[in-house]
Amino acid sequence: MRWSELRERCLVEEDEAILALNKPAGISVTGERHDTDLVELAAGQGETLYPVHRIDKVTSGLVLLAKDLGAHGQLTRQFNKRTAEKTYLAITASTGLPDHGVIDLPLSVGRKNRVRIAAPREAITRDGDTWSVDERNLLAGKNYPSRTEFTTVLRTDTHTLLAVRPITGRRHQIRVHLAWIGHPITGDPLFDKSDSYARTYLHSWQLSLEAPWRTPTDLALTAAPDTGFWLIGDDSTIRDLTDLRSR
């Protein structure tokens, strides 16, 4: 797809300093080798954009890009200080998750640059609705404290829809956290090699942060998933968005 077409179709919000898009699954934000990405597509048609944050290629949804370095610095500092609030939607092909949960598990990077929990799987414990690991069981080497919070939004007999907030912003954090507690995201190629699904059911849904050049300064963005997000295989498993935004 040409950049001008993608830009128009996926536009969520734009002003003199930012461009927010509802990115389709299957295209990178920036920096992927041997792959076309949003920043490269824009540059090919004369538009320079600076990613404020990244979401994975397989993840759809909200992406915020800055048009100038001044705005980029103001926005990225909020991500670094963890004052930007992010919420994702995730579907897991499992049941049994609580209404609310906390996954407080440090991450590390293993062989072939793969992100993993920085402890043996059997060392992960659940206390009420919180998953954690005793620091005495951490693997040798560098690890990164990582915290994910979630709310169960909808349940069916086979699937669960979660609203997920990554408090820290580590690479693959949501995907690894959910998989290592036994509830991997449906269609995630990191943990499902069957190619049974048309996409990964993870969507960048909402983002809130400050934009000092705007009046008012609050920048609250929402990107609704497309129809395909609500279809699992050949079955319309989860379609009801009722009360979703109020939870």
Image: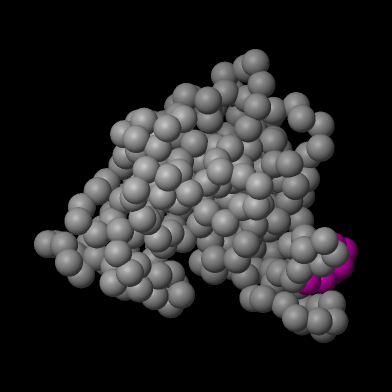
The image shows residue 97 at horizontal and vertical percentages of 65, 47
Q: In which quarter of the image is residue 246?
A: top left
Q: Which residue is drawn at 73% across and 41% down?
A: 189
Q: In which quarter of the image is residue 23?
A: top left
Q: Does the magenta stretch include residue 188?
A: no
Q: In this view, does 199 lie above or below 142?
A: above
Q: Is residue 74 above or below residue 24?
A: below
Q: Is residue 108 left or right of residue 74?
A: right
Q: Give the range drawn in magenta.
A: 118-123
Q: Nearer the viewer, residue 152 or 184?
A: 184
The image shows residue 60 at horizontal and vertical percentages of 51, 41
Q: Nearer the viewer, residue 159 or 1?
A: 1
The image shows residue 183 at horizontal and vertical percentages of 71, 46
Q: Is residue 240 above or below residue 14?
A: above
Residue at the extreme left: 215
Q: Which of 11 and 190 is in front in this view?
A: 11
Q: Is residue 122 magenta?
A: yes
Residue at the extreme top: 234
Q: Residue at x 52, y 54 (%)?
A: 30
Q: Residue at x 60, y 66 (%)?
A: 170
Q: Which residue is drawn at 58% across and 50% down?
A: 56
